[in-house]
Image (spheres, grey):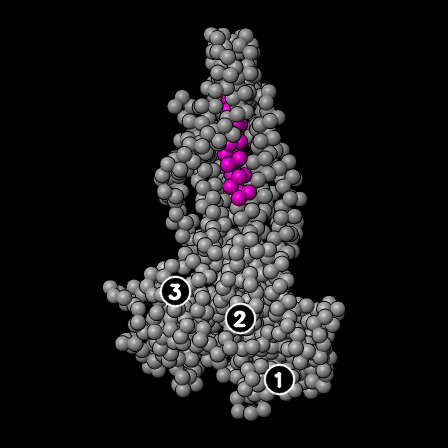
Amino acid sequence: MKNKLYSIINITGLSVGVACSLLIFLYVSNELSYDEFHENTIYRATRDLRIGDNEVSFPFTPAPLSGVLNNEIPEVNQAVRIRTVGSYLVKRTDSDESFKKEGLMFADSGFFKVFSFPLLEGNPERQFKEPNTIAISNQMAKKYFPNQSAINKSLVLDGEDTYKITGVFEDIPTNSHFQANFLMSMANLSRAENTSFTSNNFYTYFTVDDKVDPKVLQTKINEAVNVYLEPQIMKFMGKSLKELEALGNYYVIEIQSLKDIYLNSDFTVDIGLMGNKDYIYLFSAIAIFIIILACINFMNLSTARSANRSKEVGVRKALGSKKSNLIKQFLVESILVSLISIIAGILLVIIVLPMFNNITGKVLIMPDYNFTFILSVVIAAIFVGILAGIYPAFYLSSFKPVETLKGKASLGTGNSFIRSGLVVFQFFISILLIIGTIAIYQQINFIQNKELGFKKDRVLLVNDAYMLNEQRQAFKEEVRKIPDVSQASYSGFLPVSGYNRSDNTFWREGEQPTEDNLVSTQIWSVDHDYLETYQMELVWGRNFKPNLASDSSALIINEAAFRAFGFTDMNGDNYIQTNAFDQETGEFSSKTFNKYKVLGVVKDFHYESLKNDIGPLAFQLNDNSSVLAVQLKTDNIQSSIQAIEGLWKQFASSLPFNYNFLDTEFDNMYNSEIRLSKIFSVFAGLAIMIGCLGLFALASFMAEQRTKEIGIRKVLGASVSGIVLMLSKQFSKLVLIAFLIAVPLAWWGISSWLESYQYRISIGWELFALSGIAAFIIAWITVAYHSIKVAVSNPVNSLKNE
């Protein structure tokens, strides 16, 4: 109460530091809790493949793998497959109103034996054993069948398939690496019967006993799989697995612990949104640094104000106080301030937690106020109090009583070297955060403005267009008649993640398939308006023609595919081929091939995240109408949407009109980066604020200590600007030292982060110069108030008592 300004600064700095650290603790705890609630020891099978120059890893596995695991690997208790299908239109059988729903999956009958998702209704042993059966989440049961049991009721999916509800499961926790609201029987999926070990379409999970060695188990799985894989590889390649391995190729199954999936998967496509363990380390470091910054403020202010307490220490020692008693006294004071700050910090977290959840996309909650929580608060207060107060306690208690009572005690300048070092550390952290924030922002800006090879602006995506059935083409033609529409195209294959993907292996016509000439290529089904709608550039050849039958056996490839196939002449007749699919056997034929003429070459475009390089891709003229992309001419978006929606209601009045925009879907690919930028910016700003609070108070004290010196200088003719410059120079030196130390570490950190991007910004001197200028401006603004206040004061007031 006696020193209100310093107390307010200390408590504010510590409370903000505590709030930041607690928010980060809640975030990190949530990230580390993913899939911890499952009772079984669960693994997921993944695939690593290399044939020639094609090297890929993915979480998908062959359909028959689960059968091998269940029947031939004794260590496996239960194996199940999952196949995601995105979104469906779902309605009750007695209703005409459909709802667009995400999170639909096909699952094998042992699903609830593997995963600890409790069934609220239904028998877990009987789920998914029969076709056209479905289990739904409790949330969906309440939505579709309020105040009644959903068991034995039916749902219609996409207006065609009717599924009988046999189970209602508890809503899947948010800290699960995959989410589902509808689980359908795998018996409905024809691909589930595929016997090929060279195809990969399913996520395969299995349970084992705790004592199983995963390395030994992985070896046994590959030995069992190779028995079936060997003849299939021989059939197509004419070489055994050993011969292929001798040439540097491999085709292996890896296993991944369920608890490692969320933070340790780096596949291009996965079953859900994955986390990033590097962010865990980063945010944890920020939390530690912020607490240290707040503690540094406490230390700096306590030691700087030592002169004000020197006589108190001298009197106490003269009256018999021991050094240990004084240390205890100062530590208790520090712990008391820490306790007040922690309580204030908790209240601050309660206030800002909804906003923080909005930024992070999570549903974080404060822990219950039970005995454990209260004990944790007390322990944290003691720890932070000791951390902040240990040095000031020993420093203040070390004063000699004779010198302090004679007025010869240190005026808070003897320990200026330590205080300067602490200020340097504060600005070192602040500059690191400034540089990091600017670099993240520049990379996101680079991503959002990079030339992609297609136009993403003003492209409206009308979803579920396949539900129009035979009226699809009529709807498209009516949409094209709208004045603000320039072009429209049907395809579920879009140049952003999250839409259809299909790959196949091709080789040049006239060659035998070998590990050297096989090219793994994305094969996209599009219509003849696709290139024009997305404004993709043909560098050679021509586009598909709508009424030319031969174009159905032709492809348009990208430049990456042209190079991968080794073509050199764009003007010649180039052909590629692949194995034909045998409908009777359900396998690819080794004797019959599908041959395709290369009709044209499209300029390379980014169809996945910029973290990935552009791979070979081919367009095929084929019917795929899940999405109608509409290229708009003007920015009058709302009227265009209303016009298209009006047409939709004419063609399908009972179906909901669902739409989004291509640029929004593009931005969704970088949600984690955008969130990182926001979180980083918030904590960087708060860390800088804490540092500035300490600098503000320290500048106040230093100005107070030099009042008489400044008075003498003014009497002798010093100008106001000269005095302000003199007072600012000391802190400017400290900021410069902090900047020189921070730059190498920041360069290393940014370089490491950018390595995950194939396309990234270059780290130039401008980034560091901008950060350094920002740090200097922040420091000057912080100390300017006190510097100017002292510089313009009347010297008579400071000298009249001498």
Q: Distance between the Cα atoms at labels 3 and 1? A: 40 Å
Q: Is residue 158 above or below residue 2?
A: below
Q: Secondary structure at mark 2?
A: helix
Residue 268 in sight: no
Point out the frontmost of discs 1 and 2.
Answer: 2
Q: Secondary structure at mark 3?
A: helix
In 3D space, how far apart are the residues under numbered discs 1 and 2 (Cα atoms)? Answer: 23 Å
Q: Secondary structure at mark 1?
A: strand
**Mark 1 or 2, nearer chain start:** 2
- The amino acid marked with disc number 1 is Ser
Label 3 is placed on what type of residue?
A: Pro
| Residue toward you, 20 or 430 | 20
Residue at 54% from the left image edge and 85% from the top image edge: 583
Judge whether residue 233 is colored magenta: no
Label 2, on which residue? 67
Q: Residues within 10 Å of mark 3 (few under 14, many from 20)?
A: many
Judge left or right: residue 732 versus residue 330.
Answer: right
Q: Nearer the viewer, mark 3 or mark 1?
A: 3
Q: Which residue appears at 39% of the width and 23% of the height? A: 1
First along the sequence among labels 2 and 3:
2
Amino acid type, mark 2: Gly
- Which residue carries the number 1 mark? 589
Q: Quadrant of residue 574?
A: bottom right
Highlighted range, magenta: 284-307
48 is higher (above) or lower (below) than 579? above
